[in-house]
Amino acid sequence: MQAFPLRMHPRIPFNKPYFSGNETRYIEQAVRSGKISGDGLFTQRVHRFFEQEMGFAKALLTTSCTDALEMAALLLNIGPGDEVIMPSFTFVSAANAFVLRGASVVFADSTALNPNLDALALEELLTPRTRAIVPVHYAGIACDMDPILALAQARGVAVVEDAAHAIASYHRGRPLGSLGTLAAFSFHETKNIISGEGGLLAVNDRQYGPRAEVIREKGTNRSAFFRGEVDKYGWLDVGSSFLPSDIIAAYLWAQIENLQDIQQQRRAIWLRYEAGLSALAARGVGLPALPDYASNNGHLFYLVCRSLDERTALIDHLRQQGIWAVFHYQPLHQSAYYAARHDGRPLPWAVHYADCLLRLPLYYELSEADQHYIIDAVLGFYQTY
Ligand SMILES: *Cc1c(COP(=O)(O)O)cnc(C)c1O
């Protein structure tokens, strides 16, 4: 007979989607209201929340962060010949949104301190063709926004914050997503608050508000029509269908109601990791660093190993103990699509984070016992490695 191991720790996934319990109740309400297409009651509630609590001039729910970024590229009239600066170490959607409009992407390196783009090296990347800078607040930790905003203003360049990680996180006390011309959030199930798939465009420069509504509604002024501002709607501009069903908004509303609790719990987990693992810094293992201008929303906790081999061995070691820890982005400037289009500058920090950064499990339900098990497993690895 096959012998089973007596004690096996249950698998600890990298992520578990948060669920408050009210999501299904609100979805049922949306269904019963008889209006489950876009811009229903829950969507309006979500918009009001972001406009009032985060100070966005206009908040527009989208079907994803990817879509919000595509809306940003349309709104800014990005086209062939334009250049857009963004970090190489980020998710591909930031680049796709602008590449789809025919623009060139100019990749910036990350900083030594954290994976955010190196704001102090931005100036040499700007040319008369530069139309936008896309800072990505990695792990919900703010980019160095003062020099980015100053440079953008001086050169008449738009700033599109990729705030996919950055819900309810701050730069010098101001909510991330409220600083740029435009900003994009994600509610994908791996983020702090979720709707399965989902996103939001924050419009901070008011001149873009009316057109953002039109682009989101297939290029029509249907939004103004539903508000009773015009007596029929027509086709005014380019656009697409970027608005989600109110069912998605209903799900999201239940998460927003618990935002403070979610953030508190995630930060507590983050701080336990930091306390448990900070001794590794003396061995040259990197831990997330918070600049004095940045807050922490507990979106993700990472280690930066000293080499790719070390990270591979650590991932294997943790897997053997049932713990799923994962690496993150491949550098976009080395991707199959972009490698031949990149200008050839080496971006050593982007490559370093791609090779060496490891994300540990972090989700609302992660128990203290499981977390100590993870911390012990990491420390155990470094006792012998
Ligand atoms: C998740 C993510 C996105 C894409 O979000 P979707 O809602 O899945 O489109 C974009 N940028 C960053 C940095 C992300 O982490």
Image (spheres, rainbow, N blue to C red):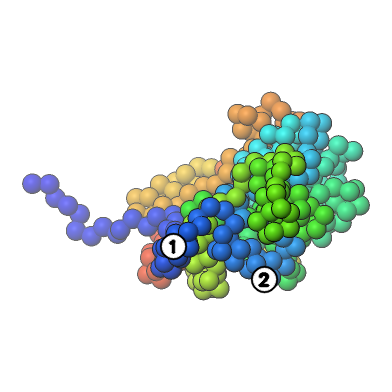
Q: CA distance from mark 1 to mark 2?
A: 28 Å
Query: Where residue 53 is drawn, which disc sits there?
Result: 2
Describe residue 249's horizontal placement relative to residue 105 as left or right. Answer: left
Q: Of the residues under marks 1 and 2, which one precedes in the sequence? A: 1
Q: Please tell me in which quadrant of the rendered image residue 205 appears.
A: bottom right
Circle 2: element type: helix
Q: Amino acid at mark 1?
A: Arg
Position in image of residue 106 (x %, y %): 76, 38
| Farthest-out residue, left | 1
Q: Amino acid at mark 2?
A: Glu
Residue 297 versus residue 306: which sits nearer the camera?
297
Question: Can residue 23 be seen?
Answer: no
Q: Nearer the viewer, residue 57 or 359?
A: 57
Task: Compare residues 245 and 74 and report the one nearer the observer.
Answer: 245
The label on residue 32 is 1
Measured as percent of width and height from the top left, residue 285 is found at: 57, 56
Residue at image location 85% in from the left, 47% down from the top = 157
Q: Nearer the viewer, residue 15 or 18?
A: 18
Q: Is residue 151 left or right of residue 369?
A: right
Residue 218 drawn above or below residue 276: above
**SS at mark 1?**
helix
Q: Position of residue 373 (x, y in %)?
A: 38, 64
**Residue displayed at 74% across by 31% down:** 102
Binning the other alpha carbons within 10 Å of mark 2 as few (below 14), some (14 to 19) or many (20 upward) gives few
- Point 90% across, 48% down: residue: 155
Front label number (1 vs 2): 1
